[in-house]
Amino acid sequence: MHVVLPERFHRSSLYGHIPIPQPHSRRPRVATVPARALTMAEQPQQQPEMAAQQWEGAAEARLPSTAAAAAWPHVASFCALHRYLPGIDVCERVAGDDGVPGCVRYVASRPAPPPAEEGDGQQAAAGVETWAREELLEMDGARRRLVYSVVGSNLGFGRYVATMTVVDDDEGVNTPAPETVPAAAAGCKLVWSFECEPVQGWTRDGLLGYLETSVKGMAERIEEAAATAAAAIAVQDAPAACS
């Protein structure tokens, strides 16, 4: 049996018959408008304050009973920040060698959970851990200065470069450390300076205020550590002095 298909169809396929356009049918032409590039005024623009603004500042604290030479080794321990900076619970080396430019440390704060309500019987969950990865860019023992940058965080930081410097009371920040420390130079100063892009969720004054509080707490802990180290050395030297 021979079946003749209508003219509007030809061969079968897996998806059914494919229609053939009728010879006299024409699709109406649709006028097209060529795409045009957005003008500068129409293109999305960055907030001018965020694009052009840069924050800079410095916080400092005195160590009245510790010379710079005694304070510097504690600051230079790049991966021991948790010993000296209040609020830092973790400081671990994740890349490179400690104290060598290229070294990366992971620092984090782990907020304690709030106390459970009386009679609840359940411990509340701890707060969100805040963290940053920081890369050592420069370690200058002659000037007692180190420079580092934030290379990742959950704190909203973009570009952030900070410098920590330890100077005797009669020295400038960029003055090379003397080979010998004068007897009168009993104290020193810890300077923490920074330059960065605006940080999400912060103001410049808020960031500077945090650094001022942090550097004071750091100075206190370094003084305690330096005094403990000096006492230990004195105990070791005592038998030799008596002999």
Image: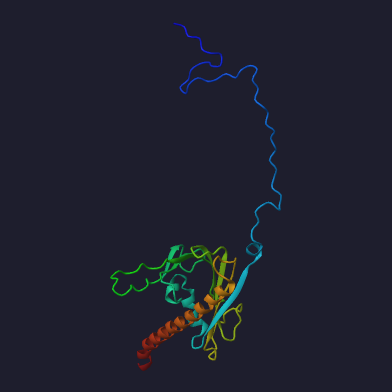
Q: Position of residue 54 (x, y in %)?
A: 63, 67
The image quadrant where one finds the C terminus is bottom left
Which residue is at a point 50% across and 77% down the rendered structure image? 214
Colouring scheme applied when the structure was drawn:
rainbow
Q: Position of residue 36 (x, y in %)?
A: 70, 43
The image quadrant where one finds the N terminus is top left
Image: 35 above or below 238: above
Quarter where residue 198 is shown: bottom right
Which residue is at a point 56% across and 66% down the rendered structure image? 199
Which residue is at a point 50% across and 19% down the rendered structure image? 17
Quarter where residue 160 is shown: bottom right
Residue farthest toward the top in the current orientation of the protein: 1
Q: Is residue 69 left or right of residue 56?
A: left
Q: Position of residue 106 (x, y in %)?
A: 45, 65
For the residue pair 118 and 49, the one nearer the viewer reads as 118
Quarter where residue 168 is shown: bottom right
For the residue pair 243 and 85, the one nearer the viewer reads as 85
For the residue pair 195 and 115, the one nearer the viewer reads as 115
